[in-house]
Amino acid sequence: MKKMLIVFSFLGFVYACNNETSSDKTSGTESTTKTTTDNGNPSYDPERGAGKFTNVDVKPELDKVMAEAGLKVYDVKCGSCHKLTDEKLVGPGWKGVTTRHKPEWIMNFVTNVDEMLNKDPKAMAQLELCLVRMPNQNLTDDDARHVYEFMRKNDGVK
Amino acid sequence: MNSSKRMLTILLALVALQWMSCKPKGASNAAAGGSAEKAYVAPGKYDEFYNFVSGGFSGQMSVYGLPSGRLFRVIPVFSVDPEKGYGYSEESKPMLMTSNGFVPWDDLHHVSFSQTNGEIDGRWTFGNGNNTPRVARIDNKTFRTAEIIEIPNSAGNHSSPFITENSEYLVAGTRFSIPVGDNQDVPIESYKDNFKGVISFISIGKEHGEMDIAFQLLLPGVNFDLSRAGKGPSHGWFFFSCYNSEQANTLLEVNASQRDKDFILAVNWKKAEEYLKAGKGVKKQVRYAHNTWDEKTHSAKHEIRTEVTVLDPAILKDICYFIPCPKSPHGCDTDPTGEYIVGSGKLAAIIPVFSFTKIQKAIADKTYDGEYGGIPVIKYEAALHGEVKKPGLGPLHTEFDDKGNAYTSFFVSSEIVKWNVKSLEVLDRVPTYYSIGHLSIPGGDTRKPWGKYVVAYNKITKDRYLPTGPELTQSAQIFDISGDKMQLILDFPTIGEPHYAGSMPASLIKDKSVKIFKIDENQHPYAAKGEKESKVVREGNKIHVYMTSIRSHFAPDNIEGVKLGDEVYFHVTNLEQDWDVPHGFAIKGALNAELLIMPGETQTLKWVPEKVGVFPFYCTDFCSALHQEMQGYLRVSPAGSNVPLSFSLGKKGADAAEKPASK
């Protein structure tokens, strides 16, 4: 009987070890980290970030309709934590954000917060400053685009 | 090899001993080693089934995973719950309103799932309130109570809320017969003349599940106990066990055990529907509450209804039939084919199994044994398929697997006995620890059981767990029934006293589970959609605070100008749009509880300050690294003071000086 027990506990140990090695793949909240991007680029592109937006079409001039819609989203979902100046509140102020990041990065960040905070160097550096993970506010793709346009307006694009 | 054989022999001997002594002993011989891994669900892995368990006298329902036995959630149903602010927030208070006013507790005994074609469809879970007769509907998308209906002419809503195979109706049969009608101030001794046992049929809306009392049946003054709907060939019928056919009203443990047989009541509800359509019902004036929760306004609505339609089966002869059933029957269970109805006499040493086909023939041939209270009594032998002989002591409830077998719980001999429905032959028995009441197989009350596990819900746990004072937890035990022999794989504690429970595959619910309430669909009249809309408004002596919460602050977080004599309403809107990020709200000295506000939701805490001073409020549900900073102050000044009403967030010293809070 004692022998049986030893065998069992050994089996359990092996099982646990196997489990551990396989579980680090699923750590973190969302999908696993892929080493290839959608366009076949083998490495992570820190300029673009992780997410569905690969190529955002941005006109040189401001789209006022979109910016207006973006303001509405800002008022409900963003304004609690982000000022439009460069003052940090809970999150960083938005002044100049469109000059610091590409549109793809911003739109990926606001729609895919968890993954970005887990692996994007710039997002992780920002989290070290703010110490509050940005809530995923469940923005639609359109919401994200509108907010980006509003950010451009805030940065003085006419 | 030899030693394990010896072990097995010892184990078998112990089991036999257990059975012979008919009372629970030594717990250490339970769960033979090596079977626990069947209940093991690795960290991060999902369970196969959701198990909804009645919380008994806690008034709540709890949700566990099977086979792990892990507790996922306690759903507040009939009792206030400070953890979630249920019954404390202004929005949820109406859910617990009754014709007697606000009743903050009940005794939840049974759960029932909505069905389509005799199978669980995963949409709603129902529970009964035993004491102040009520039935509740839980929305399986939100795991919250969506509706509660009170049952008039009823007392001790015990044989409830059992459901028909297309969710046409669920029933609410009274445990206590009571005086019904205009004059209810009658001597208790006049029980036999004045007391009636009423069964209510509650219809369920096809789309949204809304409940309505379709009709009531006026029946002799007995105690209705458990119930099951017919299915398949017996669809259109309902079966109820009842006791106290002696119609005693005192010392029932003796006086209600006089007769050798009590009854199972068979109800032809399709026939009742016909009579209802033909206008044979009588409208009675009553008062009962109907309360509904609206996920758009995040609020409950309470209304009083005043009329029910009553059918009298003593006049409308072909709705109801009594079938004799030995002795003080408790369980009354229909098998998956719908042909067999298993009665269980608490005090009987056999299990009678009735045949639906034979019942129909007996009715057609009028094979009666007289009448009881104007209802025909079918001859016992004419309805009987057969008896399971010497199965154990104190049979209570029976569930079924997918292979034609039945599993009956035995309270007195503390065991589960497996037997074949057709042959009535006993196949296997296992001890439970201890005094099992209900038992449950996933889908075991439907046409499609998943015969994988049976879970025992036990009344007593002496010796099983670390002692916790005079009271010990109740427990559930999971047995693997996939093989020929039942095998105990896990036991786990439960809340309250578990009665019936149901389980369904996780796939029926998991992907439909609500993650957030969309902020732009929030129609609460006091919602603040965005910090810009946060404000404080005085209306006479009422102060309405339109407050928002997001990681990690409230807006506003400084409020002044409230005076003694004011009633303060904190309407807190949670601006988060992320899964599992509720925020809480509590304020010092509130004679109430907290709020727990889901993402996108608005909830209101009423607070009547009784002292002058500055009162802190804070978030109660850990939300972020700066959760501890999620706080604020409210200043209360004496009545008649001239402190202006003001509110602010994030104003620094210089800004604050612009708006001095003067005396």
Image: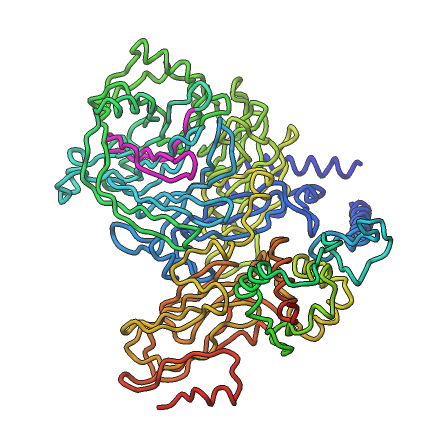
**In the figure, residue B401 lies in which quadrant?**
top right
Residue sitting at 48 percent across and 30 percent down? B116
**In the figure, residue B533 lies in which quadrant?**
bottom left
What is the magenta range?
B201-230
The x and y percentages for residue B202 are 34, 35
Q: Is residue B207 left or right of residue B272?
A: right
Q: How many marks?
A: 0
Residue closest to the far right: A42
Q: Is residue B636 left or right of residue A34?
A: left
The x and y percentages for residue B520 are 49, 56
The x and y percentages for residue A21 are 82, 53
Does B574 appear in magenta? no
Residue sitting at 50 percent across and 78 percent down? B649
Judging depth in this view, the residue of A99 and B472 nearest the camera is: A99
Residue sitting at 64 percent across and 63 percent down? A62
Judging depth in this view, the residue of A136 and B124 nearest the camera is: A136
Judging depth in this view, the residue of B436 and A96 nearest the camera is: A96
